[in-house]
Image: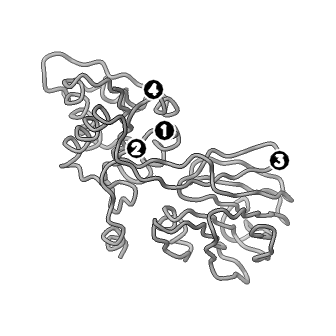
Amino acid sequence: MRVGIVAQRSNHRATSLATRLFERLGADGVTVVFDETTATALAADESRWTDGDRPSPTGVTVDEMSACDLVVSIGGDGTFLFAARGASSTPILGVNLGEVGFLNAVAPDDAVETVVSEVDRLRETGSARTRTVPRLRAESDGWTLPPALNEIVVQGSHRGHGGGAGFEVRVDGSLYTSGRADGVLVATPTGSTAYNLSEDGPLVHPSVDGIVVTEMAGEEAMPPLVVDDDSEITVRIEDASEGVVVGDGRVRERVAPPEQIRVSRADDPVNIAGPQRDFFAALGKLA
């Protein structure tokens, strides 16, 4: 049994909880690996360990988390998104240290017990309790972004004055909107509560199989649109010296307009382990 732990950077609570999990799981014969940054932080601080024998934390790249049986993300939604980049189909259990935490259902006080319970279940049945959430793929000629759990953004060189571009957006070949805007945001239901919401996009319940299309500060913007999750969204960017395609706020691909970007549901979703977050209770924290 191999468990990967990804802890929020420079967060004492996250690294302290990572230490507790390491010790508890290790006592149960579980192999634990950390993302490289967390492993370095733990190795540098001997005071974290409660017993006399100092363990040797093993650090791996986030891409190597896919070799684990379970990945534990400790932090906010940003930490979860980082862990999801490398976990592939491996179940991810999120421990919430953030303010809202739509992706992280487990409270810190319940983390050790919940993780141990999932490990026991994996040992007994070979599978964790999971729910599957979709990701999006963005591609053009010669490149493809890694799958995004929240959103894909196509925009000009920067937001605001002088940074927009001309856009044409089609859904399965049919024209939805065209004109000048800061950008176009395509989100999953999971991502509807994130960047999409700040751009006045709609909230979408996670049980809905859909894709959200939202114009960002469009001069003559159409209302946001929710389409079937089997749809292909094509975004043509033009009338700009440079454009950028961004997945989940992290991965970027610079493009030279005119260029057409295709966005669709990715083949590999994310498997979220553990108890399910109460969507409406989490919404209350947005107010």
Q: Position of residue 193 (x, y in %)?
A: 47, 67
Reading the image, the residue beneath label 3 is 141
Query: How many numbered discs, if any?
Result: 4
- Helix, strand or loop status at disc 4: strand
- In the image, what residue type sits under mark 1? Ala
Q: Amino acid at mark 3?
A: Asp
Residue tagged by mark 4? 60
- What type is the residue that disc 2 sits on? Ile
Marked residue nearer the N-terminal end (4 or 2): 4
Instruction: Tell which circle, 4 or 3, labels the residue nearer the N-terminal end.
Output: 4
The quadrant where residue 103 appears: bottom left
23 versus 158 height, above or below: above
Of marks 3 and 2, which one's residue comes earlier in the chain? 2
Image point (35%, 76%), residue name: 287
Establish if 270 lies above or below 276: above
Q: x%, y% of residue 163?
A: 73, 65
Please state the horizontal and vertical placement of residue 220, each as a whole percent of the image: 73, 84
**Which residue has dot 2 on it?**
92
- Marks 2/1 in contact by CB < 8 Å: the verdict is yes
Q: Quadrant of residue 102?
A: bottom left
Type of residue at label 4? Val
Q: Residue at x 23, y 37 (%)?
A: 116
Q: Name the residue furthest top.
A: 53
**Of label 3 and label 1, which has the lower sequence position?**
1
Secondary element at tag 3:
loop
**What residue occupies the far front of the structure in this picture?**
125
Foreground disc of the pair 3, 2: 2
Task: Count neighbours of disc 3 (C-alpha within 10 A) and say few if under 14, some if 14 to 19, many if 20 or more.
Answer: few
